[in-house]
Image (cartoon, rainbow, N blue to C red):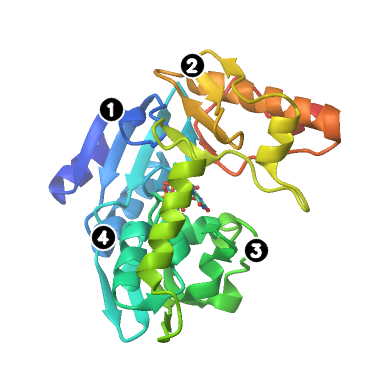
Amino acid sequence: MKFERGLEKLNIEFLKDKPLKDFTTFKIGGKARYIVFPKNIDELIEIIKLVKESGINWRIVGNCSNVLVSDKGFDGAIITTTKMDFFKTEENLIEAECGCMISQVARKACENGLKGLEFAVGIPGTVGGAVYMNAGAYDSEIKDVFECAEVLDEDLNIFKLGKSDMRFSYRHSRLKEEKLILLKATFRLQYAREEDVPPIEKANEYNQRRREKQPLQYPSAGSIFKRPPGNFAGKLIEDAGLKGYRVGNACISGKHAGFIVNLGDALAEDVRKLIYHTQKSVYEKFGVLLEPEIEFIGEFETPLFEMSTK
Ligand SMILES: Cc1cc2nc3c(=O)[nH]c(=O)nc-3n(C[C@H](O)[C@H](O)[C@H](O)COP(=O)(O)OP(=O)(O)OC[C@H]3O[C@@H](n4cnc5c(N)ncnc54)[C@H](O)[C@@H]3O)c2cc1C
């Protein structure tokens, strides 16, 4: 209760025992003991101090568009950054707090005639989640436009990281290796030249492609698996005959086999079983082990195929 009293004293917004499915793009996930909404960096630091003092589990999230939350929920504090959403543009640099939606930052950049973030207008995550994942699409990724970031470590030190400090690679950054919280990031964009396709047109075209190819009418977490070297997860899953395969109300999309969609009240365990079955089928057919791109929050009964085979 120390944690709760601390939040109340500091007037920090939080919810207690509420289902995380209301916050995930998958519309799946059990209750979290606390869901906390810092509005700025100072509040976020106070929250980290409080979780440490109270010894409760915690996890930082953005828009929960790349996570599968257990049906059992999370026994601790989910710290949601979506209210830390200030960003500013100075010439061709954009500085954005971690909770800004990357789609909004990208759209603003495009509207201002800046190129480099067109690929991100359809990504439903925050700046923090996008940097953490080194999110990407259409042959571009966050790494290409990343200039620097301010991060917070578990000992509450704030420091700056440049691009070379971030150890970016395909869907990977240093934030995955160490428990660092991204506070804000700066992106360096290019001025569009007269002969270039206007960035906003390019962005709109990418979004049109998404609408045509992706099952956006259903809740999902985007692509479930990383792209295996020299191949495409969706193609392998389709070739394994799994399009439309269902466990409960979790289903491999018939429109894009790289997506698992929630057809209505799917359970997290249904998704895990589907992931396991997909990994096993693709491995047995093609010898390729698909690695999940999404992250898991909480405890699951169904293992991942790679874990169970080791
Ligand atoms: C329809 C759809 C389409 C998608 N298309 C794409 C795509 O084209 N390309 C792509 O790469 N992804 C795509 N995604 C996946 C997802 O949107 C991105 O990975 C996004 O960047 C995740 O951001 P988020 O804020 O939702 O992160 P969350 O899902 O909230 O969190 C993901 C991870 O990031 C960590 N994290 C979040 N914020 C911070 C922070 N401030 N500091 C440190 N760690 C943090 C979390 O702890 C967690 O481990 C798609 C998802 C959907 C649903």
Q: Residue at x 16, y 51 (%)?
A: 10
Q: Which residue is mark 2?
A: 249
Find residue 47 and report its horizontal and vertical position in percent: 30, 51
- Between the residue at mark 4 and the residue at mark 2, the CA separation in whole angstroms equals 34 Å
Q: Which residue is mark 3?
A: 169
For the residue pair 280 and 9, the one nearer the viewer reads as 280
Q: Residue at x 49, y 16 (%)?
A: 249
Query: In the structure shown, which secondary structural element does the residue marked by tag 1 occupy?
Result: strand
Which of the two labelled residues, at mark 2 and mark 3, occupies the earlier sequence position?
3
- The crowding category of the residue bearing disc 1, from other C-alpha atoms within 10 Å (few below 14, some 14 to 19, many at least 20), is some
Find residue 238 and report its horizontal and vertical position in percent: 69, 31
Give residue 85's mark. 4
Mark toward the viewer: 1 or 3: 3
Instruction: Check the image and report above or below for 209 versus 219.
Output: below
Mark toward the viewer: 1 or 4: 4
Which of the two labelled residues, at mark 1 and mark 3, occupies the earlier sequence position?
1
- The crowding category of the residue bearing disc 2, from other C-alpha atoms within 10 Å (few below 14, some 14 to 19, many at least 20), is some
Which of the two labelled residues, at mark 4 and mark 3, occupies the earlier sequence position?
4
